[in-house]
Image: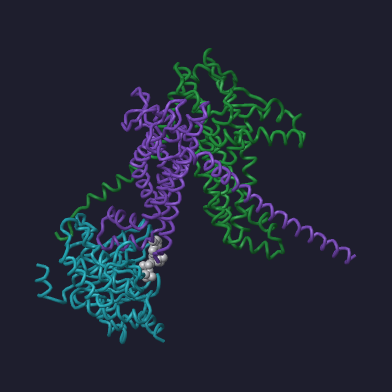
Chain colours: A purple, B cyan, C green
Amino acid sequence: MARRQRTALVSSLRRRKTGNVVMLALTYIAALLATLPLVFILFHLLRQGASTLTPDFFTNMPRPVGEAGGGMSNAIVGTLILIAIACAIGLPVGVGAGLYLAEKRAGALAMTVRFLSDVLNGLPSIVLGIFAWQFLVRPFGRFSALAGGIALGAMMIPLVTRTTEEMIRLVPNSLREAALALGYPRWRTSMSVILRTALPGIVTGALVAVARIAGETAPLLFTAFGNQFWSTSLDEPIAALPLQIFAYAISPYDEWHAQAWAGALVLIVIVLIISLAARHVTRARFGSATD
Amino acid sequence: MIAEEIEDSPRKPCLAARELSAFFGRSRVVSNVTIDFRDREVTAIIGPSGCGKSTLLRCLNRMHETAPGATVSGTVTLDSTDIYAPGADPIAVRRHIGMVFQRPTPFPTMSISDNVTAGLKILGRKAPRGKDAEDIVEGALRHAGLWEEVKDRLGESAIALSGGQQQRLCIARALAIRPRVILLDEPTASLDPLSSQKVEELVYQLKQDIAVVIVTHNLQQAARVSDRTAFLLLGDLIENAPTNTLFTAPADPRTEAYITGRFG
Amino acid sequence: MILAGVAPGDRVYQLAITAFALVVPALLVLIAIAIGVAAWPAFATAGLSFITSSEWNVQAGKFGAAPAIYGTLVSSFIALLLATPLAVGVAIFLSEIAPKWLRQPVAFLVDLLAAIPSVVYGLWGIFFLVPMLREHVVPFLRDTLHLGSTPLFSGPAYGPSMLAAGVILAIMALPYISAVTREVLLAVPRSQRDAALALGATKWEMIWDAVIPYARSGIIGGIILGLGRALGETMAVTMVIGNRPEISASLLAPGYTMASLIANEFTEATSDLHLSALMAVGAVLFTITLIVNAIARWLVWRVASGPRS
Ligand SMILES: Nc1ncnc2c1ncn2[C@@H]1O[C@H](COP(=O)(O)OP(=O)(O)O)[C@@H](O)[C@H]1O
Ligand SMILES: [Mg+2]
């Protein structure tokens, strides 16, 4: 009897151990499968895009169908302009709102704003495009760089808000007190001590936000709209790298497909550089520990 | 005018609390404290942990009100001016009454010399520059006994300094704006014995010019550095007397119990 | 008086940061108003049939968004079905199992998936994913697994399809789900793990019986967050789903989603009613994602703010 029980125990233990090994192995497979798409995508981008990516691509304008070559100089510049407008809106508002959240912590308005900014962060980007179109395109009767930049800036706000808040919370309260005890006004304490100390983290957050909006297409479809010609004017339609990639990708022409791949490669390199820069800034912060 | 007053009567109280109470929300942590702090004297505040020493200290330069839900009643006067009067600006108050905390708080993004002048920079266009600023840095660091140790690396980050050096840097930073009074909240609690000794020597230097209030839970330290000692228990000021008297012949049995319990 | 001196800066500062904070709710309200106002004519004309009818005929002025709503839900469902086990597996791997040196790089690679712009996913989808599904995966499903007779995998497989949209959405949602899951797993206290191990649990039993239950609502929050991403994703889906407003049982048939419907027809819309109908689609999408996100945030927040009572 006792012996039977023991054998049962042993065999169940063996089964449990096998189950353990199988499940642990499955997580390794999950990790492998999850990293595969990235490898595939980067591989295809390099293979398809690299050959079209000549210096001309950065300096030339798009060419009509049938003519080989040409580039996306206007779209590259357009994307940079859109990012600049977005930063001009998203950074001050996001940092300001983040300061408010860090200062008011559990206040009713702070709790509401914190929750709503998370909700805003999850809204589809195309919804922000509709918003910008309704208020900034429809009334004026034309697409504009400004409308596109504002749509992107609105996307940045919740991202910057939340990272700013988190980074400010990492600044020890004793520093705030030290500044106040020196006779710093509150605003000055926030600006030259708290924000200054949290700066590397906030820069990281801002870079992550920029990386995210740099490749956004949907909110630009009916705001910035895209432009085949050179334009840097803020109240006219403007070209953007993601819009151009989209237009070329769904076209039936092989030359344009090649251009789309090259554009995608440029876009991804921009995004990766910004992402890596963000990680580098974070590393620098942790490298020189405060305490 | 202020300088004349100092010349006239060096022992006149420069900072005085009357019926001072401090609250966190509804709970009262300092009750009806009346006490004078005199120029060129060191006053020590002692008492068991949590009795309200820090809170009392923070009421003296209006730092208490920076905590959420914190309120104050009663009056505090600096040279006969009520620092809690409706027209008084807490920021101006804090520039006359400096404060140093238990843990050193150098600004991590600033160099050593920028830390010293941090309190001056907010004067904007009136802030001293160039040679003037250098003189102030040297003066404050000398005053704090740190000059010789850091004069060759004024441009380096302040967080590279040792704990004791950081604390003296914070004292130098508080001195650079020439306060009338300096409040020290357990300034040596986080330091090693050698650094503590240096800070104690510094306290002795400080009282040559200004009033010093020091909170400490180290009774020997209170006995060593202070001219007067105040004993606080559960928010009440039990006894306030010349240090010698308080430690040798305490008037209140609770004071005696506390100091003998600690010494014994 | 020596103590006088006012700091107008502090008032300005308080006002400024409060104003900046108010931008967030204001933005949401403005978005709701923008969409609501623009969508109203279509809702008023079509009534309830706007979400029940599957006839989307611009020339006839008939606007039934059912196929787009159906396509949005189905493609997102496929995405979650594929992404959840992978994402949770990766998160477990990264927080419990992987050797230290492997954690950083794998986490970085998975996080990078979230950084790839959706138009790049779409490009890759058109030229690689769709052909690969058509030439390898669909034959495998039909001939090897004999699923061709089920309605799900019947009919011709041209290429762009609901399945392709689901797969690409799965890849895109994966980093979001795994990031949140990893975060909540790391928030599970050591003591929970020790308690399970002390009872003689194997490592996997510890994970499955102690760690996962503790983090459950946070993981569900992460999955719902991924769902929010998938529901609103526009470009990549538009490029691979085929954009046909029909409801088909087969996953190999083309479909439509709300976001891709708006993206495709918006700039071509000439009649006011058509424009309004697209806005109404936006309104439905906005409402769904708003609810989904609110639920997800609430669940994640509940885990982050301490153990459940
Ligand atoms: N921010 C705060 N909120 C509420 N109560 C506090 C706060 N800070 C201190 N207290 C309470 O006030 C009392 C006095 O604290 P404190 O002045 O710091 O004491 P001490 O410095 O003598 O150790 C203590 O009972 C403490 O718990
Ligand atoms: Mg204290």
Q: For this view, does B38 lie left or right of residue A22?
A: left
Q: For this view, does C248 lie left or right of residue A166?
A: right
Image quadrant holding the N terminus of chain B, namely bottom left
The quarter holding residue B92 reads bottom left
Q: Residue furthest top?
A: C60
Question: Relative to A50, does residue A250 appear above or below in the rendering?
Answer: above
The quarter holding residue A75 reads top left
Regarding ligand 2, which quadrant of the image does it lie in?
A: bottom left
Q: Residue furthest right?
A: A1
x 33%, y 69%: residue: B101
Q: For this view, does B212 lie left or right of residue A56?
A: left
Given residues A274 and B134, the one toward you in this image is A274
x, y (%) of residue C220? 60, 45
| Residue B149 in view in this figure | yes
x, y (%) of residue A194? 34, 56
Label tally:
0
x 54%, y 57%: residue: C104
Given residues A228 and A37, the one toward you in this image is A228
x, y (%) of residue B112? 28, 68
The quarter holding residue C245 reads top right
Given residues B11 and A125, the one toward you in this image is A125
x, y (%) of residue C159? 63, 29
Question: Relative to C285, does residue C202 appear above or below in the rendering?
Answer: below
x 51%, y 38%: residue: C120
Question: Relative to C256, does residue B75 appear above or below in the rendering?
Answer: below
| Residue C221 in view in this figure | no
x 67%, y 58%: residue: C206
Image quadrant holding the C terminus of chain B, namely bottom left
Q: For this view, does B87 lie left or right of residue A249?
A: left
